[in-house]
Amino acid sequence: MRGINRNRAFYAAWRVLPEAGAWIIGLLLLAGMEPAGNHLFSLCPISWVWQGGCPGCGLGHSVAYLFRGDLASSWQAHPLGLPALLILCWRVLELLVQSRQLYLYHSKL
Protein backbone atom coordinates (compact mmCIF):
# COMPACT_ATOMS: atom_id res chain seq x y z
CA MET A 1 0.00 0.00 0.00
CA ARG A 2 2.88 2.40 0.68
CA GLY A 3 4.15 2.09 -2.91
CA ILE A 4 0.83 3.30 -4.28
CA ASN A 5 0.97 6.41 -2.09
CA ARG A 6 4.50 7.20 -3.24
CA ASN A 7 3.44 6.86 -6.88
CA ARG A 8 0.51 9.19 -6.26
CA ALA A 9 2.83 11.64 -4.51
CA PHE A 10 5.29 11.53 -7.38
CA TYR A 11 2.64 12.19 -10.04
CA ALA A 12 1.02 14.97 -8.00
CA ALA A 13 4.35 16.76 -7.70
CA TRP A 14 5.23 16.04 -11.33
CA ARG A 15 2.27 18.10 -12.60
CA VAL A 16 3.89 21.44 -11.71
CA LEU A 17 7.51 20.62 -12.54
CA PRO A 18 7.31 21.02 -16.36
CA GLU A 19 6.35 24.68 -16.02
CA ALA A 20 9.17 25.32 -13.57
CA GLY A 21 11.60 23.54 -15.89
CA ALA A 22 10.47 25.60 -18.87
CA TRP A 23 11.02 28.87 -16.97
CA ILE A 24 14.43 27.73 -15.74
CA ILE A 25 15.52 26.73 -19.25
CA GLY A 26 14.25 30.05 -20.62
CA LEU A 27 16.15 32.04 -18.02
CA LEU A 28 19.31 30.03 -18.65
CA LEU A 29 19.01 30.68 -22.38
CA LEU A 30 18.61 34.40 -21.70
CA ALA A 31 21.63 34.30 -19.40
CA GLY A 32 23.71 32.77 -22.18
CA MET A 33 22.45 35.16 -24.84
CA GLU A 34 24.70 37.92 -26.12
CA PRO A 35 22.38 40.93 -25.89
CA ALA A 36 24.61 43.33 -27.83
CA GLY A 37 24.96 40.98 -30.79
CA ASN A 38 22.74 40.96 -33.86
CA HIS A 39 19.95 38.43 -33.96
CA LEU A 40 18.87 36.71 -37.15
CA PHE A 41 15.17 36.34 -36.43
CA SER A 42 12.53 37.04 -33.83
CA LEU A 43 10.10 34.56 -32.34
CA CYS A 44 7.56 37.36 -31.83
CA PRO A 45 4.81 37.18 -34.48
CA ILE A 46 3.87 40.83 -33.81
CA SER A 47 7.36 41.98 -34.85
CA TRP A 48 6.90 40.06 -38.11
CA VAL A 49 3.84 42.18 -38.91
CA TRP A 50 4.68 45.57 -37.39
CA GLN A 51 8.04 47.12 -38.11
CA GLY A 52 8.07 49.04 -34.83
CA GLY A 53 7.69 45.85 -32.82
CA CYS A 54 5.44 45.23 -29.85
CA PRO A 55 5.48 46.59 -26.29
CA GLY A 56 7.49 43.56 -25.18
CA CYS A 57 10.29 44.01 -27.69
CA GLY A 58 13.62 44.31 -25.91
CA LEU A 59 12.50 42.44 -22.80
CA GLY A 60 14.78 39.47 -23.51
CA HIS A 61 17.74 41.75 -24.12
CA SER A 62 16.94 43.60 -20.91
CA VAL A 63 16.99 40.38 -18.87
CA ALA A 64 20.21 39.26 -20.59
CA TYR A 65 21.85 42.58 -19.64
CA LEU A 66 20.67 42.05 -16.05
CA PHE A 67 22.44 38.68 -15.94
CA ARG A 68 25.61 40.54 -16.89
CA GLY A 69 25.06 43.19 -14.23
CA ASP A 70 24.60 46.03 -16.73
CA LEU A 71 21.63 47.89 -15.24
CA ALA A 72 21.87 50.95 -17.52
CA SER A 73 21.75 48.90 -20.73
CA SER A 74 18.99 46.76 -19.26
CA TRP A 75 16.88 49.83 -18.54
CA GLN A 76 17.58 51.19 -22.01
CA ALA A 77 16.55 47.90 -23.68
CA HIS A 78 13.29 47.71 -21.70
CA PRO A 79 12.35 49.33 -18.38
CA LEU A 80 10.36 46.29 -17.24
CA GLY A 81 13.28 43.85 -17.47
CA LEU A 82 14.02 43.80 -13.74
CA PRO A 83 10.37 43.32 -12.67
CA ALA A 84 10.00 40.57 -15.29
CA LEU A 85 13.08 38.74 -13.99
CA LEU A 86 11.89 39.03 -10.39
CA ILE A 87 8.42 37.77 -11.29
CA LEU A 88 9.85 34.79 -13.19
CA CYS A 89 12.18 33.88 -10.31
CA TRP A 90 9.27 34.16 -7.87
CA ARG A 91 7.14 31.91 -10.10
CA VAL A 92 9.84 29.24 -10.33
CA LEU A 93 10.29 29.23 -6.54
CA GLU A 94 6.52 29.10 -6.04
CA LEU A 95 6.25 26.09 -8.37
CA LEU A 96 9.09 24.24 -6.66
CA VAL A 97 7.56 24.85 -3.23
CA GLN A 98 4.16 23.76 -4.51
CA SER A 99 5.68 20.60 -5.96
CA ARG A 100 7.31 19.76 -2.64
CA GLN A 101 4.09 20.42 -0.73
CA LEU A 102 2.10 18.22 -3.10
CA TYR A 103 4.66 15.45 -2.77
CA LEU A 104 4.65 15.60 1.02
CA TYR A 105 0.85 15.78 1.20
CA HIS A 106 0.28 12.80 -1.10
CA SER A 107 3.05 10.71 0.44
CA LYS A 108 1.26 10.85 3.81
CA LEU A 109 -2.09 9.57 2.44
Image (cartoon, helix red, strand yellow):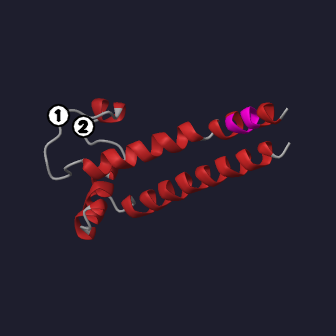
Q: Is residue 9 magenta?
A: yes
Q: Position of residue 30 (x, y in %)?
A: 31, 48
Range of residues picked out in magenta: 6-10
The residue carrying pointer 1 sits among few (fewer than 14), some (14 to 19) or many (20 or more) residues within 10 Å by Cα, namely few
Residue nearest the viewer, comparing 20 with 65: 20
Question: In the rendered view, would you say 75 is above or below 109?
Answer: below
Q: Quadrant of the N terminus?
A: top right
The residue under label 2 is which amino acid type? Gln
Q: Position of residue 46 (x, y in %)?
A: 35, 34
Residue 85 vs residue 58: left or right? right
Q: Which residue is mark 1?
A: 40
Residue 96 vs residue 24: left or right? right
Q: Which residue is mark 2?
A: 51
Q: Quadrant of the C terminus?
A: top right
Question: In the rendered view, would you say 37 is above or below 5?
Answer: below
Please identify the dominant SS of the magenta region: helix
Task: Tally the numbered discs.
Answer: 2
Name, please, the residue furthest toward the front.
Answer: 2
Residue at point 26%, 42% (across, down): 52
Residue nearest the viewer, comparing 12 with 24: 12
The residue under label 1 is which amino acid type? Leu
Residue at point 38%, 49% (across, down): 27
